[in-house]
Every structure is written in structure tokens, then in C-alpha cells.
Image (cartoon, coloured by chain):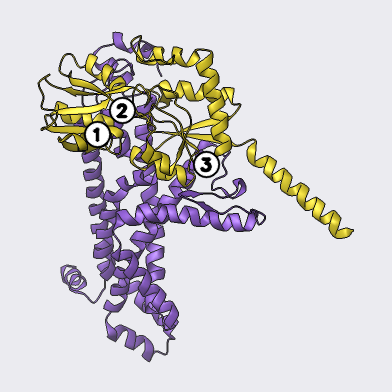
């Protein structure tokens, strides 16, 4: 904090604003934008991997594997996100702790469930009870990434499954005629060609994912919406050096601009990606590109 | 003989584990961080307020290492029972309904009044729309009073609802409303009579955590006896606040 910010009530105009916008709380707010971007950067590839795995499983010839793939897609797509987020994270956390408890504290003789309490020995706690706050935060964040990846992975799996089916049968037949094995056909013909069919669906998912990040707060991660609400609420001089009225509308306006700018940028990138993937494909888009060239 | 030695060794090991269980553990203090003067986030983004001061002093007296975490009010009890933190110290009144799910220490804040605040003294408190924070004793009281209850996730939102005219009045702890009303520049006034609710404010704990409960109870008693608790109440809530005898 710069020296001239020591006595905020005496400041005016831009200097006051400058000091106000650099309080520790505001810095946490700016940091939360980083958290959201980091979440997206990690979740998107993870969800895509889950989706790819799910789609492959759903297409498998091995029946149990296929049931698993189809079951995953059907169950996760069918459960409301918010229920999934609230239930699943607590269940996942308790599941980890239960396993660690069984493994690390075999001598424990008290029941794990006592009324509404969930009790495991200290050594089984995730994270350990005496670990610093940042470990708890990283753990919460990782749970959030995993939950987002599972939810969005199911939708991505359905999109990719459809895209794999959409690759023209003649392409696959030709590959077979060349004597490629099932595996070779899949990796050399189906996968490179399916992206153009998958992209519209995947880009939808990406947009929804961007807008779903405020769900982070349900998982105990302090995201931009949480800070905007807290910072924007009316403040009385007794509890802050920077009292102000109800400014939530301005903070939410900042979020609005952020989300709009970010989705617009994504659209531009996805459009370019689409035209790159269309090149040379046996689709209407590919044909149009060929004629224009 | 050999098995005897092994058993002894195993017993000794378990004993050390049990010891390690009680010591060196950080007590995580769960609070809301949005209910001044009880608890709020200061300009630096840290937990501050009456409960921060009381909690830090209690931890010092009970010789515990404590750490503060914030959690949304709505899910503050489930996160305690599933072990994400060890105490709730968030202006939570002791009520029978909550006592069935969690345990409370003795109160560290005496039973205090709740009050209505509105834009005019004549606001309709029994037939109009009254805002209160979700799952508070105040929300329960409004629901029984005949008024239309409008629930919000945070205290700030309830005040904003009255300011914008969405609700006719807000019903909350009087001690939280006093600074809001005083510094609203005359826009908000108290309406109707004060209502005594709840059995004071205590620290919420898991029902199985009896050892921790004893430690905090002893520390609270010692703070009550030497007057430090009353000093903190007066410091944060003003001269008129209700203190312990």
C-alpha cells in the first residue's frame, strides 16, 4: 500500500479511488479472476480427456466397458448440476477420507458416522488438520476441477460419441479395404476427421463452462462473484476506511464486461479453429473452402 | 513372549497416535465474514470483528493453534459436521433445533434483542414484506409473525432489499442493525418493538467433539470472570450493549 493511503478519509477524487482499488480485499478480487482463468485452463483439457475416454468406452466392443461409458454419460447428464456439485463434492471428500481412514487407522474402534457427524482419525483427514490454509485452498480447488471435469466430461463424451459416428462410413470402409486394423482405423481415420463434427458441440460446452464458474463458490472457492458481492455491498465507516453506498451494480457491470469479452474472444478463436479443421474435409464447409480457393 | 512384546509395542504405538491426535492440531474456526460487527472481512480481506477478537483470545487461553476460514452461511452447519472446520463462531444463536444437529458451548454473547428496521417507523411489520437472512432465528420469527418472509443469503442483501423498496422492513440482530441504522443518514429507522430471541450466541461444535467443547467452555468462563469478555462486547457494540453480570 502506498504511503499516501494511510489516512483514507482525508483523500479525495482519483487518489481516493486509487487507494480504494488497491486494498487487500480488492487484490483478492483481482486474484480471483486468475483463479477463474486457471480453473478454465485446467478443467477444459481434463473434461475433454474425460469426454474422449467416455466416448471410447461407450463405443467399446467389450460389454461391461460399454455399459460403464453409456452409464456415465446418462447419469451425469441426467442429474442437475447444482445437485451434483453440492452432493458429489462432499461425498467425494468423505470417500477419500474413508479410504485413508481404513488404510491408516485400522485400530480405530469408534463408528465413523455418529449421528450427523462424519468422523475419521486425524491422520486420515484430507488435507491434514494442521496443514496451512493454502493447502486447504488447493485441495478445494482440485476438487472443483475434478467435479467440473466429470460433469462437463459427460457432455463432451456425448458430443464426441456423436462426432465419431458422424465420420462418413465410406472413409472407414476405405481404411478397412487397405487392411488397417480396428485400432488403426480409429486413430488414423476416425479421430482426425471427427473434430470438425465435434467442434460446434464442444464450443457450446466451452461457453457454458465459462459461465458456470460462479458455481465455484458452492465448493468453497472464493470466486469473482463472491468478491464482487462482498465489495459492492454498502459499507459503513465503522468497519472500513472506505465507506460507500450500494455499489454492487458497478461491480457486477465489471463482471458482465469480463464475461462478455471473454466469450467474444472465445468465439473468435473457435471460428478460426473451425475453418482450420474444415480444410480438406468432405463436408459442405470443406467444399465451400475448396471452391473459394 | 515374542507376541507379548509385539502387543506392547503395538499398544505403545497406538498410544502415541492418540497423543498426536490431540496435540499439534490446528483448530479451524469457521465464520461467515459478512455480519458486522460480529464478523466481517476488513479492507485487507482478513476476518475481523468481535468474534475474531473473542476467538483469538479463547484460543490463547485454551492453548490452541487456531486458523480462520470463511464459509457461506447457508452451508455452515453441514461443512462443520463433515469436518471441513472444527467450530462455528459466526453470531449463531443457541436454539433447540440447531442443538439437535450440533453442540454449543456456553454463550459468549448474552441473549440479545432482535429488531425491525425500515424506511419509516410506520412500516407494516405483521402484514407487509419483511426481509431476513436465510436459516436464522429471525427468519423463523418472521414466518410465524404473519408477515411475508423474504429470505436472502447474506445480511447485506437484506438491507439492500429494504433500501430498494423490495421489502418493507428488515428483521435482524439489533446489534448488527445499530451501526447500519446510525450511519444510513436517516434513511433507515427502527420500527416497532424489540423482540428478545434465542439463548445467546455460542460456539458451534460437532457433537462428538466433547474435549474441544470443554476447553472452550473453560476459556469462556475465565473470560467472563475477569471481565475481558465484557470489555470486548463494549468495544465492539458500544456502551449500551448488554453485558454479562
- Please indicate whether residue A9 sits to the left or right of residue B208 in the image: left
Give percent across and percent down for residue B237. 35, 15
Mark 2 vs 1, N-terminal side: 1
Is residue A157 visible from the viewing direction of this image? no
Quadrant of the snapshot with the N terminus of chain B: bottom right
Disc 2 packing (10 Å; few <14; some 14–19; many ≥20): some
Do residues under tags 2 and 3 come within 8 Å of each other at their CB atoms? no
Quadrant of the snapshot with the C terminus of chain B: top left
Which residue position is annotated with label 1? B141
CA gap, disc 2 and disc 1: 9 Å
Residue closer to the observer: A49 or B68: B68
Give percent across and percent down for residue B98. 39, 39
CA gap, disc 2 and disc 3: 39 Å
Disc 2 secondary structure class: loop
Do residues under tags 2 and 1 come within 8 Å of each other at their CB atoms? yes
Comparing labels 1 and 3, the label whose residue is closer to the camera: 1
The quarter holding residue A29 reads top left
Give percent across and percent down for residue B18. 68, 44
Q: Chain B colour? A: yellow
Which residue position is annotated with label 3? A135
Is residue A17 visible from the viewing direction of this image? yes
Q: Residue at x 41, y 69 (%)?
A: A53
Chain identity of mark 1? B
- Please indicate whether residue B192 sits to the left or right of residue A229 in the image: left
Chain identity of mark 3? A
Residue closer to the observer: B231 or A86: B231
Amino acid at each position: 500500500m502506498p504511503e499516501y493511503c494511510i489516512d483514507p478519509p482525508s483523500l479525495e477524487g482519483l487518489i481516493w479511488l486509487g487507494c480504494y482499488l488497491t486494498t487487500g480485499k480488492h487484490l483478492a478480487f483481482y486474484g480471483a479472476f486468475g483463479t477463474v482463468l486457471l480453473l478454465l485452463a485446467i478443467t477444459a483439457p481434463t473434461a475433454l480427456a474425460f469426454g474422449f475416454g467416455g466416448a471410447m468406452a461407450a463405443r467399446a466392443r467389450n460389454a461391461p466397458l460399454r455399459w460403464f461409458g453409456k452409464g456415465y454419460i446418462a447419469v451425469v447428464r441426467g442429474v442437475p448440476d447444482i445437485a451434483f456439485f453440492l452432493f458429489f463434492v462432499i461425498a467425494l471428500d468423505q470417500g477419500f477420507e474413508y479410504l485413508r481412514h481404513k488404510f491408516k487407522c485400522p485400530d480405530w474402534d469408534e463408528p465413523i458416522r455418529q449421528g450427523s457427524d462424519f468422523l475419521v482419525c486425524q491422520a486420515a483427514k484430507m488435507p491434514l488438520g494442521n496443514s496451512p490454509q493454502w493447502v486447504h485452498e488447493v485441495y478445494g480447488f482440485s476438487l472443483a476441477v475434478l467435479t467440473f471435469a466429470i460433469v462437463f466430461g459427460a457432455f463432451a463424451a456425448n458430443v464426441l460419441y456423436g462426432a465419431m459416428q458422424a465420420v462418413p462410413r465410406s472413409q472407414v470402409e476405405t481404411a478397412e479395404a487397405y487392411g488397417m486394423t480396428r485400432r488403426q482405423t480409429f486413430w488414423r481415420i476416425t479421430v482426425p476427421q471427427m473434430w470438425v463434427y465435434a467442434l460446434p458441440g464442444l464450443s457450446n460446452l466451452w461457453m457454458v463452462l465459462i459461465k458456470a464458474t460462479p458455481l465455484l463458490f458452492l465448493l468453497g472457492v472464493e470466486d469473482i462473484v463472491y468478491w464482487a458481492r462482498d465489495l459492492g455491498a454498502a459499507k459503513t465507516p465503522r468497519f472500513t476506511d472506505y465507506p460507500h453506498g450500494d455499489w454492487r451494480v458497478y461491480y457486477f457491470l465489471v463482471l458482465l464486461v469480463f464475461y462478455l469479452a471473454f466469450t467474444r474472444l472465445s468465439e473468435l478463436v473457435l471460428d478460426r479453429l473451425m475453418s482450420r479443421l474444415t480444410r480438406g474435409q468432405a463436408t459442405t464447409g470443406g467444399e465451400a473452402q475448396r471452391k473459394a480457393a | 513372549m515374542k507376541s507379548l512384546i509385539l502387543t506392547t509395542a503395538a499398544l505403545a504405538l497406538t498410544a502415541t497416535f492418540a497423543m498426536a491426535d490431540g496435540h499439534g492440531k490446528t483448530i479451524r474456526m469457521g465464520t461467515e465474514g459478512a455480519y458486522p460487527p460480529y464478523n466481517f472481512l476488513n479492507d485487507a480481506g482478513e476476518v475481523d470483528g468481535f468474534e475474531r477478537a473473542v476467538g483469538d483470545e479463547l484460543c490463547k487461553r485454551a492453548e490452541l493453534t487456531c486458523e480462520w476460514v470463511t464459509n457461506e452461511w447457508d452451508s455452515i452447519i453441514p461443512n462443520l459436521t463433515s469436518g471441513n472446520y472444527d467450530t462455528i463462531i459466526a453470531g449463531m444463536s443457541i436454539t433447540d433445533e440447531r442443538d439437535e444437529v450440533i453442540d454449543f458451548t456456553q454463550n459468549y454473547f448474552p441473549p440479545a434483542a432482535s429488531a425491525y428496521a425500515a424506511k419509516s417507523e410506520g412500516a407494516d411489520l405483521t402484514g407487509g414484506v419483511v426481509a431476513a437472512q436465510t436459516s436464522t432465528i429471525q427468519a423463523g420469527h418472521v414466518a410465524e409473525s404473519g408477515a411475508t418472509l423474504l429470505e436472502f443469503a447474506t445480511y447485506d442483501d437484506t438491507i439492500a432489499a429494504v433500501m430498494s423498496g423490495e421489502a418493507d422492513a428488515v428483521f435482524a440482530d439489533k446489534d448488527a442493525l445499530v451501526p447500519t441504522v446510525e450511519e444510513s443518514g436517516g434513511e433507515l429507522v427502527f420500527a416497532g418493538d424489540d423482540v428478545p430471541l434465542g439463548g445467546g450466541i455460542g460456539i458451534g461444535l460437532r457433537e462428538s467433539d466433547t474435549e474441544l467443547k470443554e476447553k472452550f467452555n473453560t476459556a469462556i468462563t475465565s473470560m467472563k470472570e475477569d471481565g475481558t469478555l465484557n470489555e470486548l462486547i463494549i468495544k465492539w457494540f458500544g456502551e449500551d450493549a448488554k453485558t454479562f453480570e
